[in-house]
Image (cartoon, rainbow, N blue to C red):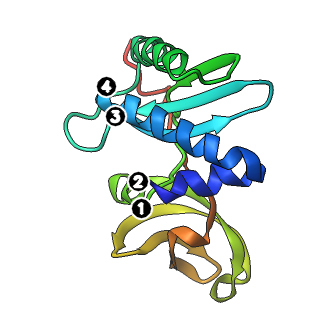
Amino acid sequence: MPIFFLLNVFAAVSGNHRRNVLRLLELIEKTVAGMDYELVDFEPAGRGLLRVYIDFPEGGEERSITVEDCEKVTHQLLHVLTVENVDYERLEVSSPGLDRPLKKASDYRRFAGQEALIKLRMPMPGAANRKSFEGILLEPDGETLKLEFEGKEGPAVLEFTLADVDKARLVPKVDFRSRKA
């Protein structure tokens, strides 16, 4: 079971619900993976809302999630949640978007070379006690993740671990001018 989900999901859930949330997470992850998608994130939001973010797994052709992909996963999850007698009112399935969250170490490897915004849990002493950094993801070295950013004295490299990260997202690059008429 990926630890990255447990940290985020458990932070929002009180003690009695943790077992049910873990069971639900395993159920959703198994269903989504069985359909050849990757579970990017899962949010049991208020008022019975379940949010599920999917993407295509790493490897193979780079594709974007479509409405049809979300529809297929929604349809399958509705059946699974009904069969498993899961208490919920609404289900939202979507792509993670252009500003995709980075949750697992494999995400940092997959998106090396792309721009990201990293917010750390604690300030980094060697980086003027900053917690927020925007820069280019570098190839991870084992469990050490790296981000090249513009420091006060020029380019610098931030080294951190997944446990140091509060939130991390890709920074979308959209070029509307490159469209040919």
Q: In the drawing, what numbered circle is on residue 35?
A: 4
Residue 155: in sight, yes or no?
A: yes
To which residue does mark 2 refer? 107
CA gap between label 4 and label 1 equals: 22 Å
Q: Pointer 2: residues within 10 angstroms few (<14), some, or many (20+)?
A: some
- Reading the chain from its start, which is encountered first: label 3 or label 2? 3
To which residue does mark 1 refer? 105
Q: What is the x, y in percent for residue 122?
A: 72, 75
Nearer to us of marks 3 and 2 is 3
Report the number of numbered marks: 4
Q: Secondary structure at mark 2?
A: helix
Relative to 35, say whether 76 is above or below: above
Residue type of the residue flagged with mark 3: Ala
Q: In the image shown, does 46 or 127 lie closer to the viewer?
A: 46
To which residue does mark 3 refer? 33
Taking 108 as reference, is 11 left or right? Answer: right
Q: In the image shown, does 9 or 151 lie closer to the viewer?
A: 9
Report if the CB atoms under discs 1 and 2 are less than 8 Å apart: yes
Report if the CB atoms under discs 4 and 3 are less than 8 Å apart: yes
Quick one: which residue is furthest to the left in this view?
A: 60
Report if the CB atoms under discs 3 and 2 are less than 8 Å apart: no
Taking 96 as reference, is 64 left or right? Answer: left
Residue type of the residue flagged with mark 1: Ala
Q: Secondary structure at mark 4?
A: loop
Q: Secondary structure at mark 3?
A: helix
Q: What is the x, y in percent for residue 157?
A: 49, 78
Nearer to us of marks 4 and 1 is 4
Nearer to us of marks 4 and 2 is 4
